[in-house]
Amino acid sequence: MAGAASWSFSENDFKQIQQHLQAFLREANARCALLVDRTGQLVATVGDPPQFDSAAFASLTAADFSANDQLAKMIGEHEFASLVHQGQKESMFLADVAKRVILVVLFDQRTTLGLVKLKGKGVVETLTKVFEEMFNRVGAGGGPSAPQKGLLEGAEDEIDKLFG
């Protein structure tokens, strides 16, 4: 797979994706939803703008999801379709969309993980259809890619910047 540069949204695709995510955020009472390409590129952000470096976050999210795919295989699972990182005040729910994009939902104590997961299942199914139609239309294919060396190196650089 070539990455984010191999496909792009039409204005209509983007509006449709935004509307689905905005409805999801209202229903789940979550703060923000980000879509990240499996190569680590930020695709879209809806809701409260993040107060951090979105590019670094996208790179680390893709690396995290990729690492968890490997962990799943080690324990005999094909993949983990979703992940949760729960903190005291802020939490994240991550879910695979069309094997090419990761939905990242940022939420706090105004909602529950159960509600985010419940509403997240529906929006993931809807977004998967939207992305599959888009990929088929533009001929970008929908299959997953092997982790790219550049992505992992980029993630290591971002980790060094954050904690170095």
Image: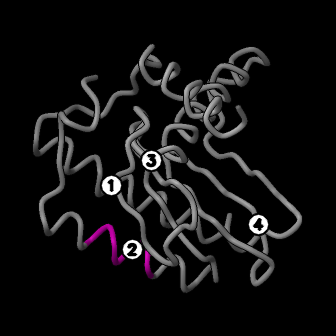
Which mark sits nearer the N-terminus, 2 or 3?
A: 2
In the image: residue 127, left or right of residue 69: left
Could you tell me the amino acid type at mark 4? Answer: Glu
In the image: residue 34, left or right of residue 133: right
Residue at (24, 24) in percent of width and height: 2
Region of the chain picked out in magenta, as a range: 16-22
Q: Residues within 10 Å of mark 1 (few under 14, many from 20)?
A: some
Q: Secondary structure at mark 4?
A: loop
Using the image, tell me which numbered label, if any, was put on residue 90: 4
Snapshot quadrant of residue 121: bottom right
Label 3 and label 4: CA atoms lie apart by 19 Å
Tell me, yes or no, whether the highlighted magenta stretch contains residue 164: no
Residue mark closest to the camera, 4 vs 1: 4
Could you tell me the amino acid type at mark 2? Answer: His
Residue at (43, 72) in percent of width and height: 46
Residue at (71, 24) in percent of width and height: 72
Label 2 and label 3: CA atoms lie apart by 23 Å
Proximity of marks 2 and 4: CB atoms separated by less than 8 Å: no
Using the image, tell me which numbered label, if any, was put on residue 55: 3
- Using the image, determine if residue 146 lies above or below residue 3: above
Q: Residues within 10 Å of mark 4 (few under 14, many from 20)?
A: few
Residue mark closest to the camera, 3 vs 1: 3
Which mark sits nearer the N-terminus, 3 or 1?
A: 3
Residue mark closest to the camera, 2 vs 3: 3
Q: Which residue is mark 2?
A: 20
